[in-house]
Image: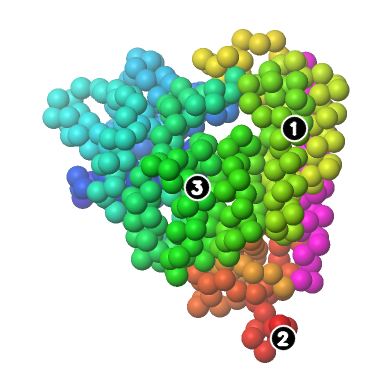
């Protein structure tokens, strides 16, 4: 058996892709290793969403070259969105790379690896063919057996937000077959998976043969072994009536809605080409809260987007204060090559940093207050694993918050009651509630 070391940068979809790549290369005799020095093949699955992503790849390759200076060179594969964006340029710039393969060509990875070893010729494969990829991967069972696993249902984007590279690295929107997704969900449950997170660049744009995301949620909910369902990342424009209504019906869809707004200013949203307004966003928020008062929101924010004035920033800050997002990501705008915003005039670094710090302080305050409100409460926790330190156990709340607690080995894979004793910004700490201690309903 040849050994492959897979390193993954970026989003949950890259994690899913890395798992499926391994399911694929197993067919040609690879086994996974976590020991870099013993690998025959090094695969780096890359992300292009943040600044300097390309340079991170070359730095990583530099470290590999040092590690193998006195050993036989491993076969080096660069996969993912940087591979798609840079393609042949990577082979020219770094001779240590042997194969560059984009996200929509993973169904060809085995044939390209075999071709390389047969011809000893460096290769680049970055065609867009999502349908062929998923048709191929559907024939290979997803071997993920983690308590919580990802399942890609949709790829690509047709929105063309001016700051975003996804349409260029993942291609147009493509929704997988409804039946194939349900079959994969059932297979994951057979493997022992208890929570499924449905993935897509615009996951709530899913539409295949008139099946929508809401249909998938309600069908997966029927699988007895699946205890929790989540989805990410969604777009405000695609929060359709049927999806909103599912929050009033579903017993397994978690009450955390991750809905990236990016800015609280309609002017900036227009500059970004987001195709939604703040009033649209607030209406969605209010409808969901009315359906289910337990629902909380998280979001993404791009701070100091070109053209953002003080008034626009203040509108973003007010939105954050009003909605009280409990867990969000915020970044200063960084231009991505090839996008419409790539050459726009940047806002002064000092002003940008000051705005980001103000936003993050407010976001973190909401996060801390939310966690504090759960102290001395009993909450449902899906137990994922035992930690290496102090024989504690790790799980997540309904709101995706990490929970560290005293428990038992038999709790792994179960939803149990945990009493929260204390908390910090990111984590809840507690102890399992024994049956004799649980409150009578």
Regarding residue 238, the answer to whether it shows in the image is yes
Taking 262 as reference, is 200 above or below it? Answer: below
Tag in front: 2 or 3: 3
| Local secondary structure at mark 1 | helix
Q: Nearer the viewer, residue 103 or 88?
A: 103
Give coordinates of residue 370: x percent, y percent: 78, 56
In the image, is 364 to the left or to the right of 203? right
Determine which quarter of the picture holds residue 251.
bottom right
Nearer to the camera, 72 or 260 = 260
Give 431 or 184, whichever is nearer the viewer.
Answer: 184
Q: Residue furthest left?
A: 118
Task: Give the structural element (helix, strand or loop) at label 3.
Answer: helix
Q: Tell me if mark 1 has few (under 14), some (14-19) or many (20+) residues whose alpha carbon lies within 10 angstroms of its own.
A: some
Identify the element where label 2 is drawn. Answer: loop
Residue 213 is tagged as: 3
- Pointer 2 residue: 440
CB atoms of marks 2 and 3 within 8 Å = no
Residue on which disc 1 sits: 278
| Disc on the earlier residue, 2 or 1 | 1
The residue at 21%/48% (across/down) is 27
Segment tinted magenta in the rendering = 348-377
Which tag, 1 or 3, sits closer to the chain's start?
3
Q: Position of residue 88 (x, y in %)?
A: 34, 17
Residue at x 64% of width, y 59% of height: 248
Q: Main secondary structure of the magenta part?
A: helix
């Amino acid at each position: 058996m040849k050994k492959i070391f897979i390193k993954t940068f970026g989003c949950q979809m890259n994690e899913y892709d890395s798992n499926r790549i391994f399911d694929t290369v197993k067919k040609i005799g690879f086994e996974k290793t976590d020991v870099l020095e013993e690998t025959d093949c090094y695969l780096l699955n890359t992300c292009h969403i943040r600044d300097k992503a390309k340079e991170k790849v070359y730095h990583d390759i530099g470290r590999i070259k040092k590690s193998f200076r006195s050993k036989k060179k491993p076969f080096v594969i660069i996969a993912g969105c940087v591979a798609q964006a840079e393609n042949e340029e990577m082979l020219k710039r770094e001779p240590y790379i042997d194969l560059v393969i984009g996200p929509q060509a993973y169904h060809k990875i085995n044939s390209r690896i075999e071709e390389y070893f047969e011809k000893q010729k460096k290769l680049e494969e970055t065609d867009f063919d999502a349908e062929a990829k998923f048709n191929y991967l559907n024939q290979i069972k997803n071997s993920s057996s983690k308590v919580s696993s990802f399942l890609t249902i949709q790829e690509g984007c047709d929105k063309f937000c001016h700051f975003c590279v996804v349409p260029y690295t993942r291609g147009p929107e493509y929704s997988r077959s409804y039946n194939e997704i349900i079959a994969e969900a059932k297979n994951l449950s057979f493997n022992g998976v208890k929570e499924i997170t449905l993935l897509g660049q615009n996951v709530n744009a899913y539409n295949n043969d008139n099946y929508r995301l809401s249909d998938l949620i309600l069908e997966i909910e029927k699988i007895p072994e699946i205890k929790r369902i989540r989805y990410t990342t969604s777009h405000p424009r695609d929060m359709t009536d049927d999806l909103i209504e599912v929050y009033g019906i579903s017993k397994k869809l978690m009450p955390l809605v991750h809905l990236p707004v990016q800015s609280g200013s309609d002017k900036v949203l227009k500059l970004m080409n987001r195709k939604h307004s703040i009033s649209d966003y607030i209406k969605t928020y209010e409808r969901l809260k009315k359906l289910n008062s337990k629902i909380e929101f998280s979001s993404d924010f791009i701070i100091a987007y070109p053209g953002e004035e003080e008034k626009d920033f203040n509108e973003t800050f007010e939105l954050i204060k009003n909605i009280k997002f409990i867990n969000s990501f915020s970044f200063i705008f960084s231009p991505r090559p090839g996008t419409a915003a790539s050459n726009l005039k940047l806002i002064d670094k000092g002003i940008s940093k000051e705005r980001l710090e103000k936003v993050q302080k407010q976001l973190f305050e909401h996060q801390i207050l939310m966690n504090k409100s759960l102290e001395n409460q009993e909450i449902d926790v899906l137990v994922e694993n035992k930690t290496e330190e102090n024989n504690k156990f790790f799980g997540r709340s309904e709101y995706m918050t990490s929970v560290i607690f005293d428990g038992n080995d038999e709790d792994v894979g179960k939803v149990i009651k945990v009493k929260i004793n204390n908390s910090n910004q990111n984590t809840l700490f507690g102890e399992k509630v024994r049956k004799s201690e649980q409150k009578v309903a």
